[in-house]
């Protein structure tokens, strides 16, 4: 079965992750043999929804796990109906290196040029 693509904007996500690391850590990552994209995704505790080009098309993939309703918006008291609704309002998908749905695979894109080969 072919997986759907979650289109992560490389030019936004990679610098956002790397800003938390020093020069030596970045050099070690670059020379590790792992792609810098995979390395950064492995370090990410969060994935900004704004860094996902096709969020509206793929957000339903995050709703396959039942939402237990234990997350409430503290400012409005709103109980979220689904994980995608929670992530959308929060602005971040949590634990992407562990929590991306099995039905999705990452496609790295640049904002102006399309997919990264």
Image (cartoon, rainbow, N blue to C red):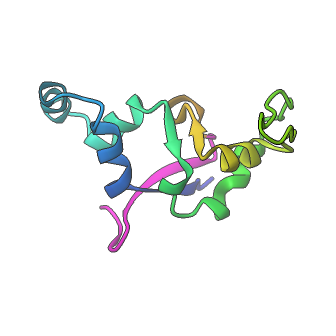
Q: Is residue 63 above or below residue 57?
A: above
In depth, the one of 11 and 57 nearer the eye is 11
Placement of the C terminus among the 4 image quadrants: bottom left
- Residue 65: % across, % down: 78, 36
- Residue 104: % across, % down: 58, 48
- Residue 25: % across, % down: 18, 25
Task: Judge left or right: residue 32 versus residue 51.
Answer: left
Outermost residue on the front side: it is: 75
Residue 114 lies in what quarter of the image? Answer: bottom left
Task: Judge left or right: residue 94 versus residue 17.
Answer: right
Is residue 1 covered in magenta? no
Q: Residue at x 53, y 36 (%)?
A: 96
Q: Is residue 52 above or below residue 48?
A: below
Residue 102 lies in what quarter of the image? Answer: top right
- Residue 46: % across, % down: 51, 36
Task: Judge left or right: residue 104 versus residue 115.
Answer: right
Q: Residue at x 65, y 57 (%)?
A: 58
Outermost residue on the bottom side: it is: 112
In depth, the one of 87 and 75 nearer the eye is 75
Q: Residue at x 51, y 63 (%)?
A: 53
Is residue 112 covered in magenta? yes
- Residue range of the region highlighted in magenta in the rendering: 101-117
Task: Judge left or right: residue 40 versus residue 84.
Answer: left
In depth, the one of 58 and 70 nearer the eye is 70
Q: Residue at x 28, y 37 (%)?
A: 19
């Amino acid at each position: 079965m072919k997986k759907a693509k979650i289109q992560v904007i490389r030019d936004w996500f990679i610098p956002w992750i790397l800003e938390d690391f020093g020069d030596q850590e970045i050099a070690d990552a670059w020379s590790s043999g792992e792609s810098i994209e995979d390395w950064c995704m492995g370090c990410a505790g969060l994935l900004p929804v704004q860094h996902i080009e096709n969020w509206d098309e793929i957000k339903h993939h995050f709703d396959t796990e039942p939402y237990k309703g234990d997350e409430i918006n503290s400012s409005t008291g709103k109980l979220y109906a689904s994980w995608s609704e929670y992530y959308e309002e929060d602005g971040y998908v949590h634990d992407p290196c562990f929590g991306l749905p099995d039905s999705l695979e990452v496609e790295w894109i640049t904002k102006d040029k399309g997919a990264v080969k």
